[in-house]
Image (tube, rainbow, N blue to C red):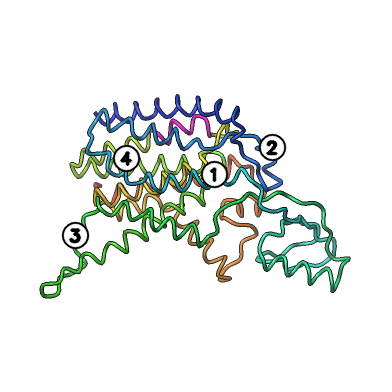
Amino acid sequence: MIIETFTLSTVTSAVTVGLLRKYMREASVVDRPIVTEHAHKSGTPIMGGLGILLGTASGPLLASIQALPPIASALPMMVLGIVDDLLGLQVEEFQKVVRNVSNRPIELGRLILQPGEEARVATEKAKRDLERILEEDPDAIEIVGEVPIKKELSEREKLALQTGAALFVLPIVPATWLWIPKVGVWNLSYLFYPVAVFGIVGATNAVNLIDGMDGLAAGLLFLASLACSGVCLGQGQLPGAAFFASLAGASLGFLFHNRYPAKIFMGDTGSCFLGAAYAAGALYYKIEIPAMIALGVPILSTLISLLHRAGVIRLAVEPLHHHIQYKYDLPEPVVVALHWTAGAVFAAVALWISVG
């Protein structure tokens, strides 16, 4: 039944995403990249995550309705993704693109701009640095253009709303982690709930961050979900195996349209749903540790970005997949393949420690 569930979810996702490509393009719900290197992707339909939802939901209807709770609990997070995608159709500001025309490196925000390199003036620090450079040495830097920046929720607004959305997952989460003891009559296992909220929000943002290249997020979620399905199957949790098989199938069905060169993007609609549903499933079926390992690539990428933002390390550009592409001048499909390979290793380790 698990194979049939996986197949149904794959086919449903592939078909519905194919229909969404047409409707989103006709409705002008399309991507407008701000990165120069991604200009060729302008006009690609977004919000393909709606097809991922339908694909994921179709599998449990065939296998077991007990696999539906993690899907339902992830819907509020998906709604936030839809709002963010729709806001992104509007322009909030125009940011300058500058080029270092001097013969020395220039600090601009979090970047060190080498001679001849270009960058978008995005952060408040970068804007202050540009003003200072133009005053002190106007011949060192040249403004070469402007790019429209999509309107979106601030990071604080996102985190607040995501935390609220994560609370919808808690009713399905049993607070029975063994490492949280009882003290007298007090059952401290309920301290697990804040940890669960952190995990749901963290997984959502990790998947959202990794969704920056064609097929990258969908491929990694396919591998991680497939591993989690195997973990649940090895533990005799058939509803859990069905749920993760559905999530893997829906990711694979979407990948048919999202592989390089992508014909549609999942948008925040898809990344928010995938991250929240994956975390909810891990909590609901109590496979938190193997699920974290299987999702190792997005999690590590997020940690590296946080270290970059804290000034502990310095990336050429953020996040990690763009840094690798920029630093080593690699084609996008090669960077994606490297991440998929690492994702497959993490997925294999998760399976090995759980059922091997």
Q: Nearer the viewer, mark 1 or mark 4?
A: 1
Residue at image point 74% right, 69% down: 129
Q: Are marks 1 and 3 in contact (CB under 8 Å)?
A: no
Label 2 residue SS:
helix
Instruction: Please report whichever mark, 3 or 4, sits nearer to the chain's N-terminal start.
Output: 3
Instruction: Please report whichever mark, 1 or 4, sits nearer to the chain's N-terminal start.
Output: 1
- Which numbered tag is attached to residue 176? 3
**Residue 196, placed above or below residue 232:** below
Label 4 residue SS:
helix
For the residues labelled 1 and 3, the Cα–Cα distance comes to: 37 Å
Please give the residue where the numbered disc 1 appears in the rendered image: 85
- Which numbered tag is attached to residue 244? 4
Label 3 residue SS:
loop
Quadrant occupied by the N terminus: top left
- Which numbered tag is attached to residue 40? 2
Residue at the right extreme of this rendering: 139
How far across and how far down the image is residue 342, in percent? 46, 48
Q: Which residues are magenta?
A: 250-258
Residue 257 part of the magenta segment: yes
For the residues labelled 1 and 4, the Cα–Cα distance comes to: 26 Å
The amino acid on which the numbered mark 4 sits, given as a three-letter code, is Phe
Q: Nearer the viewer, mark 1 or mark 2?
A: 1
For the residues labelled 4 and 2, the Cα–Cα distance comes to: 34 Å
The amino acid on which the numbered mark 3 sits, given as a three-letter code, is Thr
For the residues labelled 1 and 2, the Cα–Cα distance comes to: 20 Å
Front residue (pair 242, 186) = 186
